[in-house]
Each structure stands twice: as C-alpha cells, then as structure tokens.
Amino acid sequence: MKRMLLLAAVALPLAGQAQQGAFTIEGHIGKLNSPAMAYIDYMSNGVGKEDSAVVTNGKFTFTGLSAGYSYARLALSHDGSGKQKAVYTGDVIYFYYGKEKVKITSADSLANATFSGSKVYDESAAYNKAIGGTIMELNKWANGQVSAATPEQRKDTAFFGRINVEYRRRMKARAEAQIEYAQQHPQSYFGMVALSEGTGSPVDVKKIEPIYNAMSKSLRESDQGRELGQRITAAKTIHVGAPAPKFTQQDVNGKSLKLEDIKSKYVLVEFWASWCGPCRAENPNLTKQYAKYKSQGFEVVAISLDDHKDKWEEAIAKDQLPWLHVSDLKGWNNEVGRQYGIRAVPANFLLDENKNIIAMNLRGEELNKKLSELFGN
C-alpha cells in the first residue's frame, strides 16, 4: 500500500454567488522552464473552468473571473509529463482566492509556496487553522505515515489499520469543528463552507437545518448555500418508500430522456463519472446483472457527473456499458445530482415500476442479491 486512498470521489467546494470581477494568479516557482506546465481548475458561480500555461523562468500567469470567493486546484508538471500525472501524483495545491491579484512564490514547488495579495486566501487560512487543517493536509499526514513505514510495517495490516483509525478520528474531529465554526460565524462565507463540508452524508437534518436557517440570507442564496439547501431537502424527501424525484436530461446524442418515460419493472438510477475509480470498478458486475435481467424488465439510467463529453463517451465505450446514459456535463453541479443530494459517487437508487425507491446504494453482492430476490432467480 503506497498511499491512503479515499473510498469514493467526493465533491469539491462550490464558489460563492456574487457579481463577478477579474482575478490574476501569478506564480513564480524556482527557475523552471519548458516543458514545465501549470494547470488550473477552478469554480466560478458554480461553473467549472480550466486553463493551462507554459512555465518560463519559473513564472506563469492565469486570469479569469471570480464571484468574490472562488476555489482552485493548481497543479505543476515540472517535467512536462501532463496534467493527469501532475494532479494525481505530482505537485498540486488547493486554495481559495477572490477578485484579486494573487502571487504564489516558492524556490522549488507549489507544495512549499507562500501566498500574497489575497485577503480571501488569508481568510481561508484562518478558517482552516480553526478547524484543524485541510483535507489535503490530513491526506498528506496519512501518506507520510505510509512513506515513513519500515519494510516490516508495510507487511503489517494492523499498522495500516491504526493509520486508518487515526485518520478517521481526525476527519471526524475536523467535521465537528466545522459545525461549531458554522454556528459561530453565521455571516461568514467560510461559515457556509464549514457547514457544507461538515454536514457529511447522510445529512443529520435535525442538527444541520437549524444552523443552516440561522445563516445570513445572502449565504443561503449563494450557489453553495442553495446546494446545501438541496441536500437538506433531499435528506428529508428521498428515502426508501418515497417517490424518486422526476428528472429530464440529455443523452450522448442530445436527446432528452425523462425518468417517467422509462417503462421497466425496475430501474437503477446510477450516479457515476469517468474519473471515478470505484464507479468504473463496479461496471463489470453491473454489466453482468444488466445482461441477466434486462429481458425481464431491468433498466439502468446512468447519470454522469462528468464535465467533458469526450471523456464521458470514452468511458462508456471502453467499459462497454449498454444501458441508458444522460448528463448535463456540469460536473458536480449536475442538476439531477444536486436534486438527489449527491456529494460522492458511486451512488444509486433502485426504483420499482411506479418509480418509488425500494433500495439505495446497492453495489456488488448486495445488488446481485437484491435483483435475484426481485426477479425470483
């Protein structure tokens, strides 16, 4: 085991909702030159953006629009080996910024960089200090424990178990600190960030809704505030025995598909994405079940949280997925995903012929057993 891995892909924070203004991010990392490349992915008014820049004498610049509070992932490929490697195994940081001129400087890497010129970044740094650090810092701690392990420890499952227990303890403590922060800062943008991140899944409505309602109106009406409100509503209305929310989205050919138009005995509403490892790992099993029960009235409608059509279509073709596929290509802001309160994938809902929910989040043998019971095989 070389690093701690998250069990599911989870949503990144959304940006605030406000009048947009220009931002500039200037980086100066050592004396790197071509083929070094910098890559940025950021959220602005709930819409994902991306850009890249050649690094010349250690310098690169990004410009765009910010709604006042934006969130970015910045990755640096020192050797020009590409964005994917830089994002997942290379030099990468996550940060907040605003309608500002932000300067990021370091002698060697983004990981050791300092920020200047951003009041929003300073606010976020104070917030993260109050809650016990960022998710990335917790992941870095866990990965550091693994990297420092002796050969004997690497063979010891109990060693990894202890790391996992401590990691989850720190995550729980962080979430509790976030809820407390939200209660204490109902007028702060990072109060809403704290409440959104700390809420978790499933949503504890009795605990979270009063705190949410006490937040300022402007925060509740921000994109992040509306998204959390949708999750709270979903937690109260989407459960076994309840009707599944109706939706309409377009398939890969641009044709609208309505949930109510699917006339099958049982329908699995599956949320996934091409970039989601656990989702892709489940596809072979789901393909077998689909082939087994399709003729008996089983249908799958897969809602992708992708934001690139080519990657979505490539994954469908590569995994040979024969069922129905839809997406609005808005990533984590997929309208159906927000409607269903989705914050991590894979996630699914099994419906009967009347489109009532009869089971949730079934995978592997649990799904196989349920389908066998339903179809009497």
Image (cartoon, helix red, strand yellow):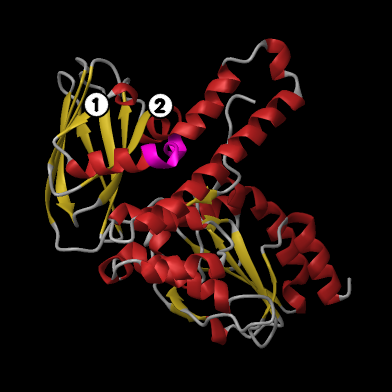
Q: Amino acid at mark 2?
A: Gly
Q: Work out whether 122 lies above or below 223.
A: above
Residue 156 point in image, percent of width and height? 75, 21
Q: Quadrant of residue 27?
A: top left
Residue 132 lies in the magenta stretch: yes
- Most prominent secondary structure in the magenta stretch? helix
Query: 124 and 97: which one is in front?
Result: 124
- Mark 2 secondary-structure assignment: loop
Q: Quadrant of the C terminus?
A: bottom right
Q: Quadrant of residue 95?
A: top left
Asked if marks 2 and 1 touch (Cβ < 8 Å), the reply is no
- Mark 1 secondary-structure assignment: strand
* Mark linked to residue 228: none
Residue 178 point in image, percent of width and height? 45, 50
Q: Nearer the viewer, mark 2 or mark 1?
A: 1
Q: Which residue is mark 1?
A: 114
Query: Could you classify mark 1 by the number of other residues whose Cα lies within 10 Å: few (under 14), some (14-19), or many (20 or more)?
Result: few
* Disc 2 to disc 1, C-alpha distance: 18 Å
The residue stretch that appears in magenta: 129-136
Residue drawn at (46%, 54%), measured in percent from left and top?
179
Residue 56 point in image, percent of width and height? 15, 22
Q: Is residue 166 left or right of residue 74?
A: right
Q: Quadrant of the N terminus?
A: top right
Q: Which residue is mark 2?
A: 90
Q: Is residue 133 left or right of residue 23?
A: right
Q: Earlier in the sequence, mark 2 or mark 1?
A: 2
Residue drawn at (26%, 43%), measured in percent from left and top?
123
Query: 318 and 222: which one is in front?
Result: 222
Q: Work out whether 229 lies above or below 148.
A: below
Does the rendering let one see residue 275?
no
Does the rendering let one see residue 155?
yes
